[in-house]
Image (cartoon, helix red, strand yellow):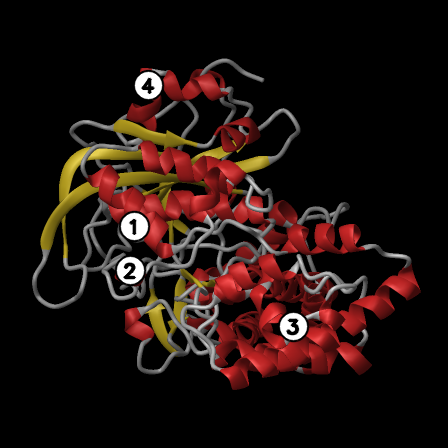
């Protein structure tokens, strides 16, 4: 453990090994024949630390006391650079809502550099909202407090849920106001500005490869891909040289397919909806990246999207996420095709995605019901019947599964329908009629019989079943209305709710009885309140 920011060790492999944009002036432009452009964060008036994540500081070998260092806010507010930092923004392209968008790039993200910790791990520090870059197009490169609070909290919440994700080191207010049209209705407002420091081994996206392929710059595509294999996938290629071949690229693509399948299964397990699954928002490491208009499934609805921009087509709805990920992987496959020149092995890797996703989904379906393993002959029907029931009455997914763990197979046969349903009644947003109660009670009896069979076959007990379910069904998630309440307070200068939520979400599977009031359905007032239901890309 080091004691100060000045002791951070930077090993900036990307800027050292890959071609830079020769133009040093920071103006919007098309950048070709380069991987990145050097750009400096825009200084702000009065950076003040709002919150920091000590666990992320530890990844960098920094103690939690670093957050009290006055220099911290200056550095991570964009006003000061540490020795060894080499700030830059990367070029990439992407398919947005299914259409090729051309050059995109780090429009409001600036990589400060790569920290190498004492274990030899590399962590890229990236400021989001620190000013314009050559890739900002018509935007200002800044971020507002509301979106920054959401990104900071959700990055850490997802990590503690066990979902692969980029991390967040800090949230810093800029002391300046930023103009945003939150509802895209022609009525922009001034809002407090803020900057998040994101941390990940790499922020490379599918779109980083798409842009070079789209421009037919195969030399740079190969150079960037080789660099990626050598640095970000070194565990796959421990004896890597400067040259890679077709078999290496296929091995790598298959690994990306597997990791992406695992990520999608995690999202579906906890009820997370990303909202903007464009190819430029897909990490090659299989991490959740770019928290914009995301949301948590409250009333269970496979067709729900948190993104107002997606309200018509619902391309990025909850139930469609695994299919969209596969489509995005196919676009990555198209991008790297010039390195392979064979379709069949790329298609085989995409098929491996389907197989791995199904494996993970079945594993999670069993675990969410407390079963030791998934038996397709019985559990496919059992799971499908449940998921068909949940939308019949608006049902809170998180509360339903968490409370279902309390079902005791010894009691269910003796309960009337209403008593069976009482176990999960707390999760309903309205009162079920007699038909729905009977329907659910019959399912619960079938489920209890399956559990009883599982106990006999495996030796499991009720207590073990409860523990298994509570380990995969979180009690606390970052519901949009909870985030909005923290944002409302923070806008007034009170950051206590940001800190409180961060602490609660550090242990999402624990009971935390002192925070029971955070384990409740979305209140009715939040159903249509701005920031509490659907959000725009400005959110």
Mark 3 or mark 4, which is nearer to you?
Answer: 4
Q: Which residue is mark 1?
A: 484
State which quarter of the image contains the N terminus. Answer: top right
Element assignment for label 4: helix
Q: Is the Cβ of the residue at disc 1 closer than 8 Å to that at disc 3?
A: no
First in sequence, mark 1 or 3: give its number: 3
Residue 455 screen position, x and y as percent: 86, 62
Q: Which residue is mark 3?
A: 340
Q: Is the Cβ of the residue at disc 3 closer than 8 Å to that at disc 2?
A: no
First in sequence, mark 1 or 2: give its number: 1
- What residue is drawn where x is 61% and y is 45%? 231
Marks 1/2: CA–CA distance: 9 Å
Mark 1 or mark 2, which is nearer to you?
Answer: 2
Judge whether 284 appears above or below 390 on screen.
above
- What residue is drawn where x is 30% and y is 39%? 195
Q: Which residue is mark 4?
A: 71
Spot the residue most to the top.
3
Q: Is the Cβ of the residue at disc 3 closer than 8 Å to that at disc 4?
A: no
């Amino acid at each position: 453990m080091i004691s100060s920011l000045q002791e951070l060790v930077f090993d900036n492999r990307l800027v050292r090994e890959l071609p830079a944009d020769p133009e040093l002036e920071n103006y919007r432009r098309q950048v070709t024949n380069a991987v990145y452009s050097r750009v400096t964060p825009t200084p702000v008036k009065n950076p003040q630390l709002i919150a920091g994540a000590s666990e992320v500081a530890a990844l960098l070998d920094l103690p939690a006391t670093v957050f009290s260092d006055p220099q911290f806010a200056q550095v991570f507010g964009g006003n000061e650079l540490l020795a060894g930092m080499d700030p830059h923004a990367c070029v990439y392209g992407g398919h947005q809502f299914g259409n090729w968008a051309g050059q995109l790039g780090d429009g409001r993200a600036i990589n400060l550099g790569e920290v190498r910790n004492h274990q030899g791990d590399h962590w890229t520090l990236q400021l989001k909202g620190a000013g314009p870059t050559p890739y900002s197009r018509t935007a200002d490169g800044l971020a507002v407090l509301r979106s920054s609070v959401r990104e900071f909290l959700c990055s850490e919440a997802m990590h503690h849920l066990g979902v692969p994700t980029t991390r967040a080191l800090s949230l810093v207010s800029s002391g300046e106001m930023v103009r945003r049209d939150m509802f895209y209705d022609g009525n922009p407002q001034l809002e407090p500005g803020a900057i998040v420091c994101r941390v990940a081994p790499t922020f490379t996206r599918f779109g980083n490869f798409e842009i070079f392929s789209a421009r037919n710059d195969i030399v740079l595509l190969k150079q960037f891909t080789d660099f990626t294999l050598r640095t970000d996938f070194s565990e796959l290629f421990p004896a890597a040289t400067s040259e890679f071949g077709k078999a290496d690229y296929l091995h790598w693509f298959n690994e990306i397919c597997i990791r992406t399948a695992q990520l999608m299964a995690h999202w579906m397990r906890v009820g997370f909806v990303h909202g903007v699954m464009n190819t430029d928002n897909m990490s090659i490491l299989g991490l959740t990246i770019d928290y914009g208009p995301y949301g948590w499934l409250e009333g269970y609805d496979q067709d729900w999207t948190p993104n107002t921009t997606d309200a018509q087509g619902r391309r990025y709805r909850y139930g469609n996420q695994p299919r969209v990920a596969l489509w995005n992987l196919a676009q990555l496959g198209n991008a790297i095709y010039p390195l392979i020149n064979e379709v069949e092995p790329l298609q085989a890797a995409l098929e491996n995605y389907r197989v791995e996703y199904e494996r993970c989904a079945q594993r999670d379906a069993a675990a969410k019901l407390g079963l030791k393993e998934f038996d397709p002959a019985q559990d496919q029907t059992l799971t499908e019947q449940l998921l068909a029931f949940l939308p019949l009455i608006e049902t809170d997914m998180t509360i339903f599964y968490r409370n279902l763990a309390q079902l005791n197979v010894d009691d269910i046969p003796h309960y009337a329908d209403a008593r069976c349903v009482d176990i999960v009644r707390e999760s309903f947003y309205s009162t079920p009629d007699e038909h729905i109660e009977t329907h659910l009670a019959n399912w619960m009896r079938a489920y209890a019989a399956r559990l009883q069979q599982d106990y006999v076959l495996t030796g499991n007990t009720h207590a073990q079943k409860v523990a298994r379910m509570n380990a995969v069904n979180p009690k606390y998630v970052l519901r949009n209305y909870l985030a909005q309440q923290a944002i409302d307070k923070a806008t007034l200068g009170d950051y206590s709710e940001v800190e409180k939520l961060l602490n609660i979400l550090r242990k999402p599977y624990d009971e935390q009885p002192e925070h029971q009031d955070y384990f409740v359905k979305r209140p009715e007032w939040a159903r249509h309140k701005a920031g509490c239901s659907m959000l725009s890309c400005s959110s």
